[in-house]
Image (cartoon, coloured by chain):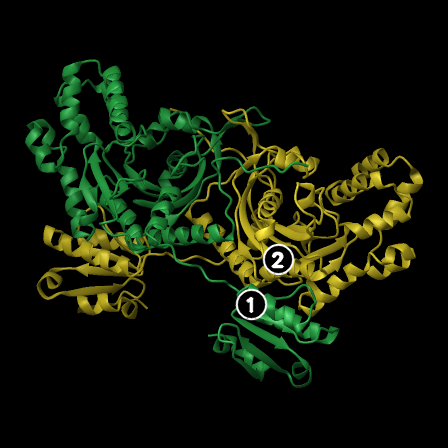
Chain colours: A green, B yellow
Amino acid sequence: MAKVPPVKGTRDFYPEQMNVRNWIFDGWRSVSRRNGFVEYDSPIFEYLQLYTQKSGEEIAGQLFSLTDRGGRDLAIRPETTPALARMVNQKINSLARPIKWFSISRLCRAERPQKGRLREFFQWNIDIIGSDSEYADADCIYTAVDYLRSVGLTSGDIVVKISSRSMLAELLKSQGFAEDQLATVYTLLDKRPKLPEDTFTALAEEQIPDTQLREKLMQIAGIATIDELMAFAPDSVRDSVEPLERVFSLLDNMGVGEYCTFDINIVRGLAYYTGIVFEIFDRNAQLRAVGGGGRYDNLLAGMGGQQVAATGFGMGDVVLEILLQEKNIIPQIQSGIDVFVIEAAPNSESEAKLLQIVNALRSKGITAVFDYRRVGLGKQLKQASTLKARFALIVGEETLEQERITLKNMNQGSQIEIPLTDFLTQPERYLS
Amino acid sequence: MAKVPPVKGTRDFYPEQMNVRNWIFDGWRSVSRRNGFVEYDSPIFEYLQLYTQKSGEEIAGQLFSLTDRGGRDLAIRPETTPALARMVNQKINSLARPIKWFSISRLCRAERPQKGRLREFFQWNIDIIGSDSEYADADCIYTAVDYLRSVGLTSGDIVVKISSRSMLAELLKSQGFAEDQLATVYTLLDKRPKLPEDTFTALAEEQIPDTQLREKLMQIAGIATIDELMAFAPDSVRDSVEPLERVFSLLDNMGVGEYCTFDINIVRGLAYYTGIVFEIFDRNAQLRAVGGGGRYDNLLAGMGGQQVAATGFGMGDVVLEILLQEKNIIPQIQSGIDVFVIEAAPNSESEAKLLQIVNALRSKGITAVFDYRRVGLGKQLKQASTLKARFALIVGEETLEQERITLKNMNQGSQIEIPLTDFLTQPERYLS
């Protein structure tokens, strides 16, 4: 029978890769918790409609959809926010606000696999629901930086580019864009850094045929600082710049200002953002975004719920891991075997003793294994060494006759003989 | 816009449920590790063929399958073993044996949702590949019991029912069953405890029309102990009973014998089992199986790999959680907020101080939050209380003027005033 291969764009996590994934997830989890977020999760599939109604074209075009036996149209989740909004809407009246939730979700998108982009990936999501304060926006951005900083990435390695959709909307309208052109402009700006210059120009000419408007857009896209923005913006727009300034001021006071910069070209691809938006990049701009997010004050109401303010972000594991590998940040993970228990001369009496010892050690939380092959002492010691066990415990005649064991330190090669009861009472003492 | 509901048979994990799930997963993970298993994971979807070729009819009929844009037939994973076999086959020559791997996998099956059975669930999987020894079978069963025992389930709560498919095959053949009838008999026996008596009888009459054979089967199904089995079995079958006796002897020596019993009716639903098989039940037999597994020595070769011996088990979270809830075993999980940082009189100077303190505490791994509403002291204290924060840290005039803070123990109501530097140098000292 022919071997069935894995599907392109998915990953097999062998123990070595799984160690890395667990190390990333553990970091996400502990940083989420210290920032006051609690974990939730949603199902891997939902009704297709949950994703087609609000996420926008990009996501809808990348869905893995299926029809079940009951004729229901379902989709594997491509992002976390719609399910989060569904869950919060279901219990909005019993949840204390602000709701500070996080999740580490497995997501699937039917994209062409390429560097930093796979068909299956994991995403850390942080959301604050029930607060329209810039505190909440700043706390989200802070939490993202807090994780990146905690693993050793400096402001020389990464940058958070921040802007505001509501400000951009006001600015575009002040320059003559109509309300119904805004979505087109957002998509255009979002795609800009991912497209070659001439492809972008062609697309812009197609989407905004008016030359004057197009020039205005390019002028706006060239605004590099908040000072330039304030100089360019008519009075009517200045109010909408204030929240942006406030967020920068809060981030400064929280000690992560050096990671953050204004970038008017950040709009985010998803349709539902309404206010502050941001994306995180490597400083060398060699990789796709490490993460991004923003305010989405209308999504919950748009999905049949109450009007509740919300802000959040997502950070995928794929680009992050490339960056962490490049920076040589991922730690070597050691073998987990504490004790390899060995029979000096296999017989039924010493086997029983070995099994009792294995049981006693494991019950105390110590990783203890033994050789399934029933081979001689030399081969068992070799296996202990192959598996990088830290200690070998030898059950020999002295164990059966005097309840004494030999404990060999596999790294140092030294060994001691000690009473079995002493060892089992305080194994940590001997295994340090 | 109408609210989109969740799909029936899936679960929303709100923080409270997520705490329980994390507690179960943490237990699975730590018990796996102390028994010498390392974690792996496979993609959430695979080529459909991976599941249709070897798992047997029951699984194939429960697949969530889909066709992607490239016309590939895919399926969401309904079990872990085929992907495990695929992964091991891919790297068989570079993996040290025995391979002791575990995973905690999200699985989906298109079943009718009912008590203990959902369309989406999680399963703990333990597998030992590359050993044909009964040590490996015993170590799998031990590991399953080790987890259940570790959370407090006694041999009065649960039972592992163990049998052997190879023994049963020999026994059936010795009583006149043909090789090509065995699969039918396995399915029949597997379904027996799940069907009403008369439904089972009707099914048996349909599947085994020969009255004499059917009576033989019922006689075999009535064998209650290994002694009875040895008395019933002709000499030719006795050799195949030995591995079973050996497993029980090993489990006795490992200290979990009282959890284990022989049950000739255990055959497992999946097609690929070849030797020792087992299922774990609550002693009251009120619930579906908590878990089960067995030896599958031909699966890897059957999937295009080498002939490599293998044994393993799976334990789902759904029935397990019902059992743990019934036994009142799941611990209450406490609020995670260590410090709620408060401004006595909100102004820009004390806000900056508050944000610095929040940053300093979080950087030390302490869960610190603050009020996004910019309200008065009383409301902030009330919020700290609502969120069950352990301490409130008050930034007041004395903080700005003398670098001193007030720390209030929210449970005891007591408060102390201390230098900020002392607190930030050793926060654990004040938060215990």
Question: Residue at horizontal 67%, vertical 47%?
Answer: B306
Asked where in the image residue B399 lies, by quadrant, the reply is bottom left
Image check: A381 left or right of B301? left
| Cα–Cα gap, marks 1 and 2 | 13 Å
- Report helix, strand or loop for mark 2: loop
User: In the orientation shown, which residue stands out farthest toward the bottom?
Assistant: A402
Disc 1 packing (10 Å; few <14; some 14–19; many ≥20) = some
What chain letter is assigned to the residue under label 2?
B
What chain letter is assigned to the residue under label 1?
A
In the image, is residue B1 above or below residue A278? above
Q: Is residue B386 visible?
A: yes
Q: Which residue is mark 2?
A: B97
Image check: B167 left or right of A211? right
In the image, is residue A323 above or below residue B364? above
Q: Quadrant of the N terminus of chain A?
A: top right
Question: Residue at horizontal 21%, vertical 39%?
Answer: A162
Q: Amino acid at mark 2?
A: Arg
User: In the orientation shown, which residue stands out farthest toward the right?
Assistant: B212
- Report helix, strand or loop for mark 1: helix
Query: Which of A412 and A356 lies nearest the eye of the viewer?
Result: A412
Q: Amino acid at mark 1?
A: Ser
Question: Residue at horizontal 20%, vertical 36%?
Answer: A163
